[in-house]
Amino acid sequence: MTDDAPTPAPELKTAKPGWLSGGRAGYLALGLSVIALGFSAAPYLTGGSSVRAYLLEHPEVLQEAQMALQTKDAEAAVEETNQAAAANAGLLAPDARDPAFGPANAKVTVIEFFDFRCPGCKAVAHDYRALMAAHPEVRFVFKDWPILDRGDDITSQYAARAALAAHQQGKYLEVYDAL
């Protein structure tokens, strides 16, 4: 006979969460969880939220919000443009090489930035020329900005170069009108 009698296995003690062991903090946590679950499920149990119902009754609120967002975006774009203009004031100022018409000492100078291929620029060109004719006391400066070229297509640059070459010959406005 041997003394090798089996030893009993040690008891495993498992910890119970506080709310299961009856601790006060555990019951408080359980209660708060049940309340939070109730609030989160309430809109589904009642058929919808009060916000949803309000928006369905007053859809004009969504239009107002959209308009406010568009206004905010437009104001941000204007501010961004103003900051870029302030940072690059030298590029925006008239240059002696730019075609200019009207008195050099005019109280008002209008600078037009344009691309000969720009549909918007073409749409206002006639009105711009009419403005020049109506206000001979104003200086009008033309800044060719060939920005619509893509890859090997440099038509805007060719048009700008042609107009500037015509300017050296005193025929800028004729080429501007034709292009």
Image: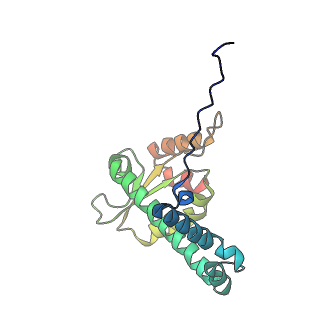
**Position of 128 compared to 4: left or right?**
left
Nearest the viewer among 135 and 22 is 22
**Where is residue 168, by image quadrant?**
top left
Query: Horizontally, is 45 left or right of 65 in the view?
Result: right
Q: Is residue 129 visible?
A: no
Q: How is the image coloured?
A: rainbow
- Outermost residue, top direction? 1
> Quick check: can you spot residue 86?
yes
Number of marks in the image? 0
Measured as percent of width and height from the top left, residue 67 is found at 55, 74
Q: Residue at x 42, y 50 (%)?
A: 99
Residue 166 horizontal side relative to residue 156, left or right? left
Residue at (59% x, 37% y) in the render:
11
> Residue 34 in the image: x percent, y percent?
59, 68
Quadrant of image for the N terminus:
top right
Q: Nearer the viewer, residue 29 or 118?
A: 29
In the image, residue 91 sits, relative to residue 151, either above or below, namely below
Q: Position of residue 135 (x, y in %)?
A: 40, 70
Residue at the farthest bottom position: 57
For residue 98, above or below residue 64: above
Q: Is residue 65 above or below residue 26?
A: below
| Displayed quadrant of residue 14 | top right
User: Residue 86: percent from the left, percent from the top?
Assistant: 33, 53
> Is residue 109 left or right of 151 when viewed as pictured?
left
